[in-house]
Amino acid sequence: MSSEQAETVKIIHIEPRDSHLGLDLRELWAYRELLYFLTLRDIKIRYKQTAIGVAWAVLQPVVTTAIFTVIFSTWARFETGDIAYPLFVLSALVIWLFASTSITVASNSFVNNANLVTKVYFPRLIVPFAATLASLFDLIFSVAILLILMVYYGVVPTTQLLLAPIFVILALVMVAAFGTLLSALTVRYRDVKFALPFSLQVWMIASPIFYPVSMLSEKWRLTYAINPLTGVIDGFRSSLFGLPFNWPIIGVSSLSILVLCFVSVVVFKRMEDDFADII
Amino acid sequence: MQVIKVEHLSKQYAIGGSTHNTLRDAVGGFFRRNSAPALQIFSALDDISFTVNEGETLGIIGSNGAGKSTLLKILSRITKPTSGSAEIRGRVGSLLEVGTGFHNELSGRENIYLNGAILGMKRSEIESKFAEIVEFSEIEKFLDTPVKHYSSGMYMRLAFSIAAHLEPEVLIVDEVLAVGDASFQKKCLGKMREVGEKGRTVIFVSHDMNAITRLCDRVIWLKDGTIRMDDEAKKVVGAYFHEQANLGAERTWEDGDSAPGNEYARLKSLRVCDENGESIQTADIRRPIGIEMTYQVLKTGKVMVPNLHFFDESGTCIFASHDWDSKWRTEPRTVGRFTSTVWIPGNFLSEGSIFVGAAVTTYEPLEVHFVEWGAVTFNVIDSLDGDSARGDYAGLMPGVVRPVLRWENE
């Protein structure tokens, strides 16, 4: 062994259980290339063997927006201010579709990658993270449609637009935390697979996607913001259309995301050691 | 220098009973914690301690269920021990399976990067070895073809080439050489020996006693989760075979689930018999010996070929025989129970203990439905009547076979 190598020799300790609760971020960083290749793989294979391929990423937001527009601007009407209803819906759908697909894919990620988990060591967090990051790819398409629609409706962007990425990142953090939590639970409890589609439907209705937050009476708004999507979607909309930010709502939702992250890490750490044995 | 230090390692699994598999069970279990049925605890590894020095090639042998895989999984950090600890100096590369994480839809090139990253290689490392990997695997022309169009041989070659270019300080290899064609296997064994000679530490699990004695300096024999023996390779392999000799010439696997096999086929029984079909433990060297294998085909759709391997006491494979003349050579098996018997002619095997390995294999794509090494054993006794190969000579006769040959005298 050369002296250069000797300096970098790492000693691996194998012990029954990790006593500390923290995440080994340094190790996660060391495996960043694996995260990159797994994300790349997930993107590459997502639309393989589909007839229309990536068009799915375009079709989903477009069709959903069209349906909502037909329903909610003909039969039921919501007050959306100066913003055209399709634009109002699409701005939320961009976030929602990303969240729902990403959470669905991430929650199944361990089961789908069982062969990796039982045969190779790597920080397990990479699996749901890769699934989440791969879903970001679809987001590019829906954001592109959103921008086209904004130009079409003549929306003049304000400097607030620069804050929009912050809400996308907030959404990403929420989705990663949620996806990670569910991925760990799915390994042990396959119930998650059945409960998830139903829960997502409820969540969608409970989020300000096809109606504005202002529809709720003032005193309920903060409670409503415990749903982390409320702050994310509302903030995203405000930055797109130059509306005043509702900081208390964004604050409560952010706090909610923080709690979610914490719960997710605790549950994940408790369960990950057994993955290979019970998957 | 010690590279691996394993101290009092144990691993227990809860089997049967109620492992919470659905939320309802978990919630229910929470409320009636006291009345929950007790789990059966199965000890896969029980208080294992050993050390491995730098540059050593350590072999691990033992029958199925002895704890070999569990030990490898713990050392590879895939699963955690229940108690005890282990310490490894340096980067660990583990190869518990060839082609882990290969994706059928991706091209050979893409899979090289993906699989390399999965095995723990850095991107720069993969790039610098890319040409070498491609050359070793002999798939240059198909580099940009999705691997789903590869033949099983090409697939294995590519997968092994990537793994073979992994250069960790400690390499852990499970039975991965049992696949691929003979010439490629040879190439792989050569590559592994090279790794050993470069001063890297290798832990190698195999049922192939030939490979074990050729590659390893030292062998640990695991039995029922404990170390039965830890010594020089030849000594351990000899002792292992010696103990297997007590297995008997007839065995039946009563329980369908624990019998060797997979979803397609399971071994039911094996026995050694004479030409009249009577079970025997000891065979006369001059008489034909039959090995009768009964197996259950559980799922149709595969062409299955039963095959038997014969080993002598030193672990040398004397020969292997595949059922080459039945109609099932080309026809997919139907569901049901099959019995295949191979006849070894008289005056062929040498005297001593013979160990039989039984397997059922599908060739294309290669799939071993089960392989049970040292499944049964029998003894061959030479005659002193003067009508066998030894004639009237009563002394020691070497050789793994003892045919009666024609001699011409002028």
Image (spheres, coloured by chain):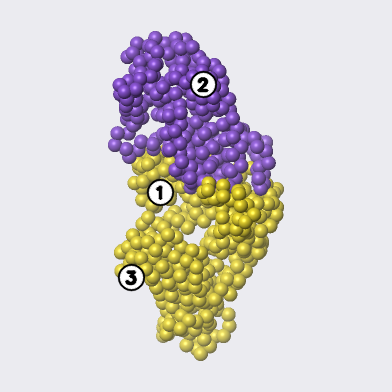
Chain colours: A purple, B yellow
Which residue corresponds to the image point at 38% horizontal and 22% vertical from the top-left? A90
Give the number of the mark in front: 3 or 2.
Answer: 2
A12 above or below A175? below
Give the number of callouts. Answer: 3
Which image quadrant for residue A19?
Answer: top right
Which residue corresponds to the image point at 59% horizontal and 61% vertical from the top-left? B66
| Alpha carbon separation for disc pair 3 and 1 | 29 Å
* Picture quarter with the C terminus of chain B: bottom left
Q: Are marks 3 and 1 on the same chain?
A: yes
Residue wearing tag 2:
A221
Is residue B369 in view? Answer: yes
B380 above or below A10? below
Is residue B117 in view? Answer: no
Foreground of the two, A22 or B392: A22
Give the number of the mark in front: 2 or 1.
Answer: 2
| Alpha carbon separation for disc pair 2 and 1 | 58 Å
Q: Secondary structure at mark 3?
A: loop
Q: Residue furthest bottom?
A: B385
Residue wearing tag 3:
B325
Q: Position of residue B265 (x, y in %)?
A: 42, 63
Chain where mark 1 sits: B
Which residue corresponds to the image point at 55% horizontal and 18% vertical from the top-left? A248
Residue wearing tag 1:
B155
Foreground of the two, A31 or A129: A129
Q: Residues within 10 Å of mark 1 (few under 14, many from 20)?
A: many
The reply to whether callout 3 and callout 2 are in contact (CB within 8 Å) is no
